[in-house]
Image: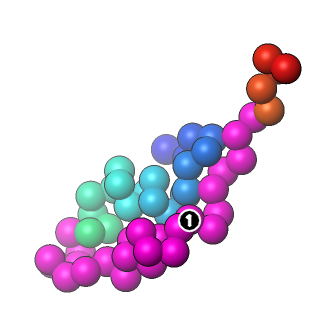
Amino acid sequence: MATPPGECPQCWAHAHDKSIHKALKGAQCEPCLDHMHNGCPDRVPKKQSLWW
């Protein structure tokens, strides 16, 4: 599944692919914690609005 515009590819994958966190067996997900505390550095760009 492709990451929608405006979303972080890593966060999107971790939210929608349950096998990623299942493999951790209850442990903290370091990439998720990093993005939660420091923000997402690599969001997919949104298309420019044609409204203005």
Q: Residue furthest left?
A: 26
Q: Position of residue 46 (x, y in %)?
A: 70, 40
Q: Nearer the viewer, residue 43 or 39?
A: 39
Q: Please identify the quadrant where the C terminus is shown.
A: top right
Point out the stretch of residues depicted in magenta.
Answer: 22-47
Taking 36 as reference, is 43 above or below it? above
Q: What secondary structure prevails in the magenta region?
A: loop
Write the residue at 24% across / 75% down. 23
**Which class describes the residues within 10 Å of circle 1: few (<14), some (14-19), or many (20+)?**
some
Residue 15 in sight = yes
Residue at 26% x, 69% y is 21
Q: Position of residue 47 (x, y in %)?
A: 75, 34
Residue 40 colored in magenta in the image: yes
* Amino acid at circle 1: Cys
- State whether residue 31 appears in this view: no
Could you tell me which secondary element the residue under label 1 belongs to?
Answer: loop
Q: Is residue 3 left or right of residue 49?
A: left
**Lateral position of residue 28 relative to residue 52, left or right:** left
Viewer-side residue, 8 vs 2:
8
Q: Dot 1 corresponds to which residue?
A: 40
Total label count? 1
Q: Residue at x 25, y 80 (%)?
A: 28
Coloration mode: rainbow
- Residue 11: image location, x then y, percent: 45, 60
Residue in the image at 35% along x and 50% along y: 16
Please say if 33 is above or below 10.
Answer: below
Residue 37, position as x, y percentages in the image = 44, 74
